[in-house]
Image (cartoon, helix red, strand yellow):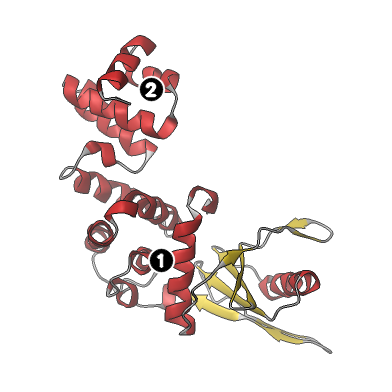
């Protein structure tokens, strides 16, 4: 999952939601610890934060790994060597099967908190009036409900709850949906949703291209093409790429952008 494209503000909000729901703990101040813990090979912990005088290490694991307890133990010792704070660990598991969360050897007994998202009813998150909770519902158990209806509901509720951060939450939704192979459904429902609002609010590069080509080039409607040009430029910031995608000259693209005060 490409967490680098998601703002730290959104990540912090989601972390706070996870702690509130699963740990029943309200965390106010979060400090990210951007540190690479190295041993024989380079390994980077997903999320390491300092909050309320304690270290919280959270791994987001998308595939089964029989050595996960050993990996987590290595992270634990490396973190303890670096910081003199209590260390709390959790794995948010998104994959198939049952992930082991403990290690027992002759002289060692170790475990960590395991949050297996596929076993959690999506209603736990859908019922929240918090976009950081609602976006997590895409990872949970839909309980045999219609997938498209659930995705549609998530998108509409995200818009109602987070108009100012809507695009950022949709980026997060798209990233999470890839884990469950629901990215195609999410993109389709996004396109249906954006039929009702401004094209300029499109959240992703792909939709900007698709809408511009569909309504601009194929239907020959100049106004829609211009909207597609503007939408794509906002994401790629490159006149050359936009010109190539819409089969226009760079001068024509610049004229459209100037017209839209971009």
Figure disc tally:
2
Of pointers 1 and 2, the one earlier in the residue sequence: 1
Instruction: Classify 195 as above or below 175.
Output: above
SS under mark 2: helix
**Residue 7 in sight:** yes
Q: Quadrant of the C terminus?
A: top left
Report the front residue among 5 and 244. 5
Q: CA distance from mark 1 to mark 2?
A: 34 Å
Identify the image quadrant of residue 154: bottom left
The structure residue drawn at horizontal position 69% and vertical position 81%, both measured from the top left corner, is 86
Marks 1 and 2: which is nearer the front?
A: 2
**Label of residue 91 in the image:** none
**Residue 62: x, y in percent?**
54, 63
Question: Mark 1 Cα within 10 Å, few/some/many (few <14, many 20+)?
Answer: many
Report the front residue among 176 and 232. 232
Identify the image quadrant of residue 228: top left
The structure residue drawn at horizontal position 56% and vertical position 63%, both measured from the top left corner, is 63
Circles 1 and 2: CB atoms closer than 8 Å: no
Q: Is residue 156 left or right of residue 75?
A: left
SS under mark 1: helix
Instruction: Classify 7 as above or below 99.
Output: above
**Residue 151: x, y in percent?**
28, 59
Q: Is residue 80 left or right of residue 257?
A: right
The structure residue drawn at horizontal position 38% and vertical position 65%, both measured from the top left corner, is 132
Question: Mark 2 Cα within 10 Å, few/some/many (few <14, many 20+)?
Answer: many
The structure residue drawn at horizontal position 82% and vertical position 61%, both measured from the top left corner, is 39
**Residue 220 in sight:** no
Report the front residue among 226 and 173. 226
**Residue 179: x, y in percent?**
46, 58
Residue receiving disc 2: 242
**Label of residue 139 in the image:** 1
């Amino acid at each position: 999952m490409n967490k680098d494209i998601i703002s730290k503000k959104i990540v912090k909000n989601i972390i706070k939601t996870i702690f509130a729901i699963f740990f029943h703990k309200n965390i106010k101040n979060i400090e990210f610890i951007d540190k690479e813990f190295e041993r024989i090979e380079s390994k980077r912990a997903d999320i390491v934060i300092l909050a309320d005088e304690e270290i919280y290490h959270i791994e987001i694991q998308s595939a089964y790994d029989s050595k996960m307890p050993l990996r987590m133990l290595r992270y634990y010792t490396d973190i303890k060597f670096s910081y003199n704070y209590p260390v709390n660990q959790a794995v948010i598991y998104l994959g198939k099967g049952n992930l082991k969360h403990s290690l027992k050897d002759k002289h060692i007994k170790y475990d960590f908190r395991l949050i297996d998202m596929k076993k959690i009813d999506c209603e736990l998150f859908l019922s929240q009036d918090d976009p950081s909770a609602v976006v997590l519902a895409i990872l949970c158990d839909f309980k045999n409900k219609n997938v498209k209806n659930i995705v549609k509901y998530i998108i509409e509720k995200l818009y109602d709850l987070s108009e100012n951060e809507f695009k950022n939450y949709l980026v997060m939704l798209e990233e999470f949906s890839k884990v469950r192979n629901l990215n195609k459904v999410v993109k389709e429902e996004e396109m249906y949703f954006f039929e009702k609002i401004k094209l300029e609010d499109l959240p992703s590069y792909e939709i900007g291209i698709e809408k511009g080509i569909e309504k601009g080039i194929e239907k020959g409607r100049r106004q829609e093409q211009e909207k597609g040009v503007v939408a794509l430029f906002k994401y790629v910031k490159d006149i050359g790429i936009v010109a190539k995608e819409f089969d226009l000259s760079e001068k024509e693209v610049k004229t459209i952008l100037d017209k839209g005060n971009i």
